[in-house]
């Protein structure tokens, strides 16, 4: 019975991964557009920096601007 569900789960996982990749691509494009409209330097609070560091560590080197 396992052989029946394994391909189905693989299909669902790949579909979800593709959707996440599209969301990331969209958010990167949106981020780039918004950055163009901001001044060169944007001040962040200590709490904002701590949150970005925490979230960035979970992503690892895959995060970029």
Image: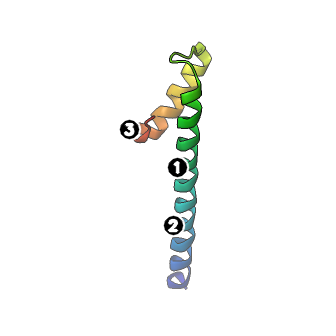
What quarter of the picture does the N terminus occupy? Answer: bottom right
Residue placed most toward the observer, 24 or 9: 24
User: For the point 55% across and 20% down, which residue is it?
Assistant: 49
**Do the residues bearing badges 1 and 3 touch, measured as CB atoms within 8 Å?**
no
Which is more N-terminal, label 3 or label 2? 2
* Neighbours of disc 2 within 10 Å: few (<14), some (14-19), many (20+): few
Residue 61, position in %: x, y?
38, 38
Residue placed most toward the observer, 57 or 34: 34
Which is more N-terminal, label 3 or label 1? 1
- The CA span between labels 1 and 3 is 16 Å
Residue 35, position in %: x, y?
55, 29
Closest to the camera, between mark 1 and mark 2, is: 1
Which is more N-terminal, label 2 or label 1? 2
Q: Quadrant of residue 52?
A: top right
Left or right of 3? Residue 61 is: left
Q: How is the image coloured?
A: rainbow
- The CA span between labels 2 and 3 is 22 Å
* Neighbours of disc 1 within 10 Å: few (<14), some (14-19), many (20+): few
Say what secondary structure mark 2 lies in.
Answer: helix
- The CA span between labels 1 and 2 is 16 Å
Residue placed most toward the observer, 63 or 8: 63
Q: Which mark is residue 25?
A: 1
* Neighbours of disc 3 within 10 Å: few (<14), some (14-19), many (20+): few
User: For the point 57% across and 36% down, which residue is it?
Assistant: 33
Instruction: Provide the residue designation for mark 2.
Output: 14
Q: Which mark is residue 61?
A: 3
**Do the residues bearing badges 2 and 3 touch, measured as CB atoms within 8 Å?**
no
Q: How many numbered marks, from 0 up? A: 3
């Amino acid at each position: 019975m396992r052989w029946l569900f394994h391909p189905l789960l693989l299909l669902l996982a790949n579909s979800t991964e593709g959707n996440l990749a599209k969301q990331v691509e969209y958010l990167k494009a949106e981020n780039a557009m918004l950055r163009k409209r901001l001044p060169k330097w944007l001040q962040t609070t200590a709490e904002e920096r701590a949150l970005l560091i925490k979230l960035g560590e979970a992503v690892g080197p895959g995060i970029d601007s």
